[in-house]
Amino acid sequence: MSTYIMQLDLLRTAVFYGLLACGVAFLWTPLLTKLLYKYKITRRSEYDASLGIEGRQSKSGVPIMGGLVVILTVTVLTIAFNWERSFTWVPIGVMLLASLLGGIDDVMNIYGKKRRLRKVSQTIRLIHVHKDWKQRIWLTLTLPWTAFKRTSLWLGSHPGKGLHVHERLLLQFLAGGVTAWWVYFKLGEHWQEIHIPFDGYINIGWWIIPLIIFFVMASANAVNFTDGMDGLAGGALITTFSALALLSWIGGYSELMILNTMTVGALITYTYFNVKPARFQMGDTGSLGLGALLAINAIVINAMLLLPLIGFIFYLELGSVILQISGRYLLGRRILKMAPLHHHFELRGWSEEKVVMRFWIMHAAVVLFGIWVALF
């Protein structure tokens, strides 16, 4: 009976903090909206190809960086009421790092100047013709880096004014590396075991490090790709973090349960203002930060291999981008009308509301399946 009472108390506490996060977010959202309009942190057509789709022109001029409603609310409340070095400080730190990366990209795309990358062929030519021999040596030594930067452009739709793909990947790798370091070196040998549904646990040792880095980077980008329609990412994230809260409760991770319910509460506020017509949009600031937090919280409760189910719609969108890139460079043609996947259906004539609602429903069904699998 005492265990039951303790579990019930934890549930009450977590729900309370979820409601608190929702209320706090509602209180300061008007201030954030005012600041975003004041400093013209808004969506621009020159770096957003999706605004060329018929019916989406009205989204130009809508404030971005609305994800700060969730990021800052969760951060402040966690520091004030749920700060625990073993379980919450690294998730919050990595979330802020990924969010900072997204914020820099959002601001640079608005206030920055057009950035260009030198082609590999241009670099090779300079190596042969440059008058300064020191510069020729430098260009030769950095040629692999130049090739990496140019190759990474395959993963991006436009260089724009913001961070280039290679810069984003390196900073996301850093966020994943911090998470991997924390799990491997600070949480103990037990955390090197991963749960295989229906089969038990297996200790994979240091292989946990690249696996964690992969899932942190994949989840951050997956949420970022999904944030392209009013309400889509916010509504799906509510379902996903609710599932993580439930699994945290079942596993006895009280601090993570409270962190997840706080995130759900703040996301309810965000989604209220983000449904069509959106008052603001998440931006890279929110999508990258929340994607990283999603991955970390799943990893800590040993649900890492379930991320494609718990984060189903996000990984589906990520997969559609990979499919489109593969078709373009391997087959020489597009496989989808446009990637990510929600734009494909939009170009097929589906209304934005229809896409969002059906994606929400599919996502909820697969997340429910993921919870069932997690219990084995």
Image (cartoon, rainbow, N blue to C red):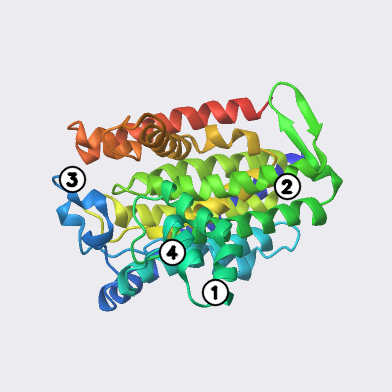
Quadrant including the N terminus: top right
**Tag of residue 209:** 2
Give the CA separation, mark 2 to mark 4: 26 Å
User: In which quarter of the view is residue 26 placed?
Assistant: bottom left
- The residue shown at (32%, 29%) is 335
- The residue shown at (47%, 72%) is 130
Amino acid marked by disc 1:
Gln
**Tag of residue 163:** 4
Q: Residue 365, image x and y in percent?
A: 45, 28
**Tag of residue 53:** 3
Judging by the rendered image, the residue that carries numbered circle 1 is 135
Up-down relation of residue 332 to residue 276 (above or below):
above
The residue nearer to you, when weighing 134 against 234, is 134
Amino acid marked by disc 4:
Leu
SS class, disc 2: helix
SS class, disc 4: loop
Give the CA separation, mark 1 to mark 4: 25 Å
Amino acid marked by disc 2:
Ile
- Residues under numbered marks 3 and 1 in contact, where contact means CB atoms less than 8 Å apart: no
